[in-house]
Amino acid sequence: MLECLPQVPEDSILGLAAACRADPNPRKVDLTVGIYMNEEGLCPVFDAIRLAQDALVQEERTKAYMPPAGDPGFNSGMQQLVLGLGSPALLDGRVSSIQTPGGCGALRVGAEIINAAAPGARVWVSDPTWPVHIPLLGSVGLQFATYRYYDPASHGVNFDALVEDLKGARHGDVVLLHGCCHNPCGADLSLEQWAQIADMADHQGFLPFIDIAYQGLGDGLDADAAGLRLLVERLPEVLIAASCSKNMGLYRERTGATLFVSANPASAAALRTQAQVAARRIYSMPPAHGALLAARVLQDEALNANWRNELEAMCWRINGLRTSLVSKLEQCTGRDFGFIEREKGMFSFLGLSADQALALREQYSVYMLDSSRINVAGINGANIDYLAESVGKVLQAG
Ligand SMILES: Cc1ncc(COP(=O)(O)O)c(C=O)c1O
């Protein structure tokens, strides 16, 4: 029976990363997958997480299942981290959440809830968006429409086009927004633009679904959540998918949360029960390890301070790399790359064609996506000159 299934191509991003690993060129540069890498090219374990882990290993006495909604300490910590300590929605008891396997699990549980409330609902996604959004939400049965977002000519958000397209979003529709550090383009909305989207959601009745996978890697933990918090303050209902993969370095531990901001406490509590039932259909119970570490880091004052310092250092390093890359690229190409400094988080498009990205790969072992999306955190002192020179040569060749 199963023999009828043909081989399918590998995920394009993971496939490129594998090709880079297999490349024998000692000067190769991997700017493919969205993981943070330090100056040594390693994806490090946060010290705060290591300390939490040492303590957990000493204290853990059982591997019994987690509760279906996950660890209560993790859930309350995540609600405060994402929404802010003084969030009126939190204080009013209008928020519930469920611990999920990573941000992907959070998106999937959110999609299940949307589909339970409005089967086959239409989700508006930005053009472009993270390619996994469509299969992850679509496999539940949701439909899609796109709204224009990134303008390659100006290297920024085309907000007028976004507004024009989202005028078509109605009550019963969902609008998926990147909370910060847009993947793949790095171009984020200003607070004024978030406010305008809040007005539109209010008047038109669509439900915002915010994917926040990079909180703390753009301008800092609170600044990165400011747009999201504005929507939560202004609207009765907001869905949020949060991930601890990047900002706690818990990638493989699969740690995330779906947050439900509802019109009233009863509805928030009902949504948590719905989410538990949805999770039971997919994976039953969430994995424990990552969430128990995150809970410690969120609750323990000293660990929390450690973690915030480490995250801030990562954020500064990424922003510093952006500044250095702009000047190196400008030196090597004579073109204006200033937009890279205005963008946030791990990603930016370099603005190259697919052929130029291919030439960089084949001739210089510089690996980026065909769209020329780079992971800025893959740059370091040892490869930045080679990267800029290679881009310069490929641009010169036409
Ligand atoms: C935009 C976006 N959303 C969600 C995720 C999910 O992250 P994870 O499932 O690894 O926590 C990612 C990961 O790359 C992402 O880029």
Image: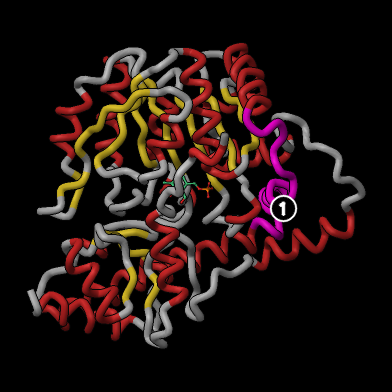
Residue 117 placement (x, y as % from top left): 48, 13
- Residue in view at x 54 percent, y 36 percent: 106
* 398 shown above or below 32: below
Mark 1 residue crowding within 10 angstroms, few (<14) / some (14–19) / many (20+): many
Q: Is residue 29 left or right of residue 52?
A: left
Q: Is residue 330 left or right of residue 184?
A: left
Quarter of the image where one finds residue 227 = top left
Q: How many marks?
A: 1
Quarter of the image where one finds residue 218 = bottom left
| Magenta-span inclusion, residue 294 | yes
Nearest the camera: 93 or 347? Answer: 347
Q: Which residue is mark 1?
A: 293
Q: Quadrant of the C terminus?
A: bottom left
Quarter of the image where one finds residue 384 = bottom left
- Residue in view at x 44 percent, y 63 percent: 315
Q: Quadrant of the N terminus?
A: top right
- Residue in view at x 41 percent, y 70 percent: 19
Nearest the camera: 92 or 5? Answer: 5
Residue 214 placement (x, y as % from top left): 46, 51
Mark 1 belongs to which amino acid?
Answer: Leu
Q: Which residues are magenta?
A: 282-304
* Label 1 near ligand 1 (CB < 8 Å): no
| Magenta-span inclusion, residue 71 | no
Residue 182 placement (x, y as % from top left): 34, 48
